[in-house]
Image (cartoon, helix red, strand yellow):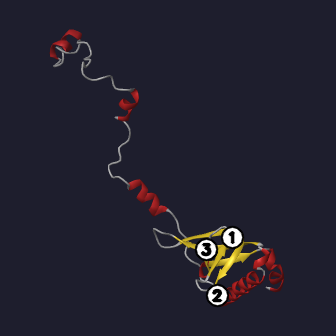
Amino acid sequence: MNNDKKATDPYKDIIDLPRHISKTRGKMSLRDRSAQFSPFAAVTGHDHAIKETSRLTDKRIELDENAKNFLNEKLRIIQETIDDCQEIEVVYFHEDDKKSGGKYLPVIASVKKIDLYDSSLIMMNGEIIPIEDILEINGPIFQVLEDFNP
């Protein structure tokens, strides 16, 4: 049976030849050889686009008048005590650069200045927070205010 297979095998004349070794090219490294079999991404950037699409963003929360007045009162307290350099936590909305929405970020730092012209808080760490993006402000300096707010 083995002889019949050899007789009909179209490669019988080359099957027992030694492996060819090139005289002009060096042996391929195992790393380069294995790279031939690595996955191929036919559409460049497709994985990134899918991850970007699935990334979630938050919608901006619109504050009611009571919440805005409460924030304004806290800003007044910050202005009055700005020389004390007390740390506060500001949670503000940061708009996403690539899609609609964004995320709420907390910052814990002292306020350096309230810029009324640009309507922003300038923090000691250099961060500038637009007042219209602020969701909440917390800290020990507001304890008196918190006691009176129902």
Q: Quadrant of the C terminus?
A: bottom right
In this rendering, the count of numbered labels is 3
Residue neighbourhood size for the residue with mark 1, other residues' Cα within 10 Å, grouped as few (<14), some (14–19), many (≥20): some
Foreground mark, 2 or 3, reads: 3
Identified at 24% across, 21% down, the residue is: 24
Q: Position of residue 51 (x, y in %)?
A: 46, 58
Identified at 80% across, 77% down, the residue is: 141
Going from N to C along the chain, the mark reached first, 2 or 3, is 2
Q: Residue furthest top?
A: 3
Residue type pointed to by label 1: Met
Quickly name the residue at label 3.
128
Q: Secondary structure at mark 3?
A: strand
Left or right placement of residue 114 versus residue 8 in this view? right
Going from N to C along the chain, the mark reached first, 1 or 2, is 2
| Residue 118 or residue 74, whichever sits in front | 118
| Residue 85 or residue 99, whichever sits in front | 85
Residue neighbourhood size for the residue with mark 2, other residues' Cα within 10 Å, grouped as few (<14), some (14–19), many (≥20): few
Residue neighbourhood size for the residue with mark 3, other residues' Cα within 10 Å, grouped as few (<14), some (14–19), many (≥20): some
Quickly name the residue at label 1.
124
Q: Position of residue 77 (x, y in %)?
A: 76, 83
Left or right placement of residue 2 versus residue 65 in this view? left
Tag 3 near tag 1, CB within 8 Å? no
Foreground mark, 1 or 2, reads: 1
Residue type pointed to by label 3: Ile
Quickly name the residue at label 2.
64
